[in-house]
Amino acid sequence: MNNKAVMQTYARYPLTLVSGNGCRVQDDRGRTYLDFIAGIAVNTLGYAHPALSKTLCTQAKNMLHCSNFFHIPAQQQLAERLTALSGLDQAFFCNSGAEANEAAIKLARKYFHDQQSPRRNIITATQSFHGRTLNTLTATGQDKVKIGFDPLPPGFAHVPLNDISALAAAINAQTAAVLLEPLQGEGGVNIAHADYLLAVRKLCDQHGILLILYEVQTGIGRCGSMFAFEQANIQPDILTLAKGLGGGVPIGAMLATSAVAVSFGPGTHGSTFGGNPLSCTAALTVLDVIEAEDLLENCRQRSSQLMHGLNTLRATYPLIREVRGAGLLIGAALDAEAAPIIAACRDIGLLILPAGPNVLRFLPPLNVSKQEISEALELLAQALAEHMAEKPNGAAR
Ligand SMILES: *Cc1c(COP(=O)(O)O)cnc(C)c1O
């Protein structure tokens, strides 16, 4: 097999994964790996969860797709579940994170258009990641994703995370919304502090502008609560979800308060595949299993175990500068390049991701076991020991 017929948009690891079960995957040479990537926080229930497999088989025999010209009961049920869980009023379904974010930007603008207000601009955080469409890459607070794609759409400004005066200074009469990830997943596992989020909410209320939270990576239990915003005791006006929602089946969602959602009337927005019976029944099953198997509690317990284990390793390996994150979205910031350590882990059977050049990112499925966390910590310790043996003076920054 060769990769030449595929556009070379990804720098792929030299590995072909062919099957999986729970937290483990097999490659095409029969080697087994402990998977702490989970398809980038997508495989909420791990691989081949029996309840999800059953739902998908049943749905395939019944109806995969139905156009949004018709009522779709599973879509209505999923909307009811997600609005009850989030405290928001209505949902729109699409197929990915970027699409959910794109829908949020459109809705915020349309809301102010409908009020004859000039507010159209969006403020986001530096180091954020919001997707690869032209608007969402412009919203993204990292220049590297923008190179070569000009002209970029106007209407976006960036401020540093956790700096409330910078945000206050950036808001003007054209500002429609502040758009944040409660925890920046791609940008280095950077936490938006609860007091900052609370202050952002207040600032938005004072100015009559919208707070949009992008929980594409942090939502659906990833941070130890169904949504990360719950931990800051705030409510967004608009919320986006994707990655973990379908447990591996592509689905995105954009939720909003009814005051805002009215601006998306018939003909304003749409998606051919969005909210089809297959993806919605998959998402309903993911939510059922999170509840039935008490996975939020498991997420929190495994989170403390992993954080504690990483901090213990930090005492032996000072090249681990800081351990941070929430739930099972955990970063270990290094005084070294992350890539060689990630490769060393892969060679001995542990799959992890970077988040930026110097951070190791751990994203196991929410049903990861105590034993699997211990095993991952042992493999990481082994990889670090090998790395230090090769570079006894410590790696350069
Ligand atoms: C992953 C991610 C995206 C992109 O999602 P796609 O499904 O690849 O479009 C957008 N925003 C955030 C916050 C993400 O974590």
Image: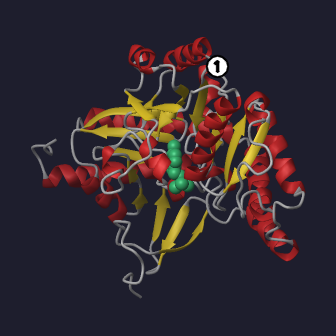
Quadrant of the rendered image containing residue 156: top left
Residue 256 higher or lower than 36, as above or below: above
Crowding around mark 1 (Cα neighbors within 10 Å: few <14, some 14 to 19, many 20+) is: few
Quadrant of the rendered image containing residue 107: top right
Q: Which residue lies furthest to the left in this view?
A: 393
Residue 330 spot, x, y in % from top left: 45, 39
Quadrant of the rendered image containing residue 227: top right
Which of 18 and 30 lies nearest the eye of the viewer? 18
**Residue depicted at x 34% and y 72%:** 14
**Residue depicted at x 55% and y 14%:** 203
User: Three-letter amino acid code at disc 1?
Assistant: Asn
Q: Which residue bears the numbered disc 1?
A: 233
For residue 253, side relative to residue 147 (left or right): right
Ligand 1 closer than 8 Å to the CB at disc 1? no
**Residue depicted at x 46% and y 80%:** 28
Q: Which residue lies furthest to the front in this view?
A: 116
